[in-house]
């Protein structure tokens, strides 16, 4: 699968690392030569220097062959614009990182979809949800979600004096 990641910072690098280890064809675009060089030397990816919302730059990539275009820079407007352009140029699915929580409202999501942004993600919201999940399961030692979170398997530590200690069923 061919995947383009706009932004080679913390989130972009992490995504590229995960996806390239799964044998996907990854292209990273960034306007910071240092982070691109770091990514190039540590990951099996192709790098392109420049602005991911630049149509001339995007023309260099066959976007019709791109399965996912991820825009995860720290600049929300650039992410939205890059996704919109990439979608119009043939990317099959676009995902933009946003910072403004108000843009997660249903109406905003519909507007972004009309502009060519298929999905929006908010790292701060995802972090808050994970913290809430951890607080909710503070006694849980392990937690595994299945079926997109509809089923969870959890592990608990049972104290020696617990009624359940030694129970098999």
Image (tube, helix red, strand yellow):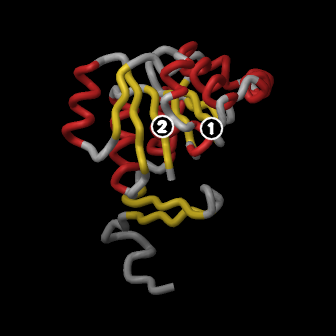
- Up-down relation of residue 73 to residue 22 (above or below): above
Residue at 37% x, 59% y is: 141
Name the element at disc 1.
loop
Residue in the foreground of this view, choosing between 51 and 12: 51
Q: Earlier in the sequence, mark 2 or mark 1?
A: 2
> Residue 129: where, in percent of width, then height?
53, 37
* Residue 64 position by quadrant: top right
According to the image, label 2 marks what residue? 4
| CA neighbours of label 2 inside 10 A, class few (<14), some (14 to 19), many (20+) | many
32 and 10: which is toward the camera = 32
Q: Foreground residue, 96 or 132?
A: 96
Q: What residue does disc 1 label?
A: 91
Residue 119 higher or lower than 111, as above or below: below
Q: Is residue 149 left or right of residue 23?
A: right
Residue lying furthest bottom in this view? Answer: 168
Residue 125, given in percent of the width and then of the height, sits at 54, 29
Q: Residue at x 26, y 25 (%)?
A: 35
- Residue located 43% across and 53% down the image: 24
């Amino acid at each position: 699968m061919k995947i383009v990641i706009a932004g080679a910072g913390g989130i972009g690098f992490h995504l590229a690392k995960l996806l390239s280890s799964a044998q996907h064809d990854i292209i990273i675009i960034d306007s910071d030569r240092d982070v691109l060089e770091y990514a190039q030397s540590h990951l099996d990816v192709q790098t392109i220097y420049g602005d991911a919302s630049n149509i001339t730059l995007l023309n260099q990539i066959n976007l019709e062959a791109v399965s996912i275009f991820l825009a995860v820079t720290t600049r929300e407007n650039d992410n939205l614009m890059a996704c919109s352009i990439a979608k119009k140029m043939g990317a099959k699915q676009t995902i933009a990182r946003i910072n403004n929580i108000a843009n997660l409202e249903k109406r905003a999501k519909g507007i972004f979809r009309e502009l060519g942004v298929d999905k929006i993600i908010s790292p701060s919201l995802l972090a808050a949800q994970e913290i809430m999940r951890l607080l909710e399961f503070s006694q849980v030692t392990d937690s595994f979600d299945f079926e997109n979170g509809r089923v969870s398997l959890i592990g608990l530590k049972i104290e020696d004096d617990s009624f359940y200690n030694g129970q098999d069923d």
